[in-house]
Image (tube, rainbow, N blue to C red):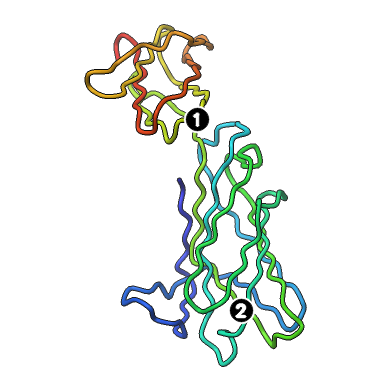
Amino acid sequence: RVLFEENRMYEMALLDSAPDDDHWFFNDYMLTWGAETNTIQLKPVLPNVLPANSPATVRIAFQTPVTDYADYNTYDVSVKVNGASLTNTASWSGLNQYVFESQIGQDNLLEGTNVIEFTLTGDEDTFMELVYINWIEIGYQKKLAAVNDSATYVAPDADNRQYTVSSFTTGNPVVYRIADVSDVSVITNTIITGSGPYNITFSDSAASGTIYQVAAPAG
């Protein structure tokens, strides 16, 4: 998971539900009058994105300031990542921070700069709507790279996944599946590519928390 947060704009008028409420937000915000819409873009940078069609998770913390009318509003924000819509729309009411969670295919993510587009749709019966963004969190599969001919990865769930680990200096790394200290096995359905550095690719499904240790003989 990668967290993006910019403490560039301070808002005093928040509903303090806890002593450590965050009053700092991204400098860009959404503002509508009546039934109009307002769109902004933020551009987080993602490192080591693995090309895959598995789902990536997007979490966004929205916040509305205290006004004479804000507590009566319902807020609706649609979100796109690099032009692709998330699987659902953020919709909430009230003045507490709202953490929105949705998914998108990882093949819509780019290594490097990504464009996240937020569109606030106002209501004709609403005088004004104002929404800040506190933080954005994106969970996705990353490219795996060996350090000193060794790499360790922990399975996030029991789904069948394909892994590619790069940056080996020798062409014979071995993949160990470690369920616990007394249950260690070798995965043999591996594919070695490259001519130095080398990559190893394997597929497996195991219980969440299973450790994969990939090591070359010198690792």
Residue type at numbered disc 2: Leu
At a point 41% along the width and 12% down the height, the residue shown is 187
Q: Is residue 150 left or right of residue 158?
A: left
At a point 51% along the width and 9% down the height, the residue shown is 195
Residue type at numbered disc 1: Asp
Q: Is residue 17 left or right of residue 200?
A: left
Q: Is residue 12 above or below residue 192?
A: below
Residue 27 in which image quadrant: bottom right
Whole-percent x and y of residue 174?
37, 11
Q: Nearer the viewer, residue 113 or 178?
A: 178
Residue 28 in which image quadrant: bottom right
Whole-percent x and y of residue 23?
43, 75
Q: Nearer the viewer, residue 29 or 97?
A: 97
Q: Which mark is residue 159?
A: 1
Q: Which mark is residue 117?
A: none
Residue 34 in which image quadrant: bottom right
Q: Is residue 53 left or right of residue 158?
A: right
| Helix, strand or loop under label 1 | loop
Quadrant of image for the N terminus: top left
Whole-percent x and y of residue 68?
56, 92
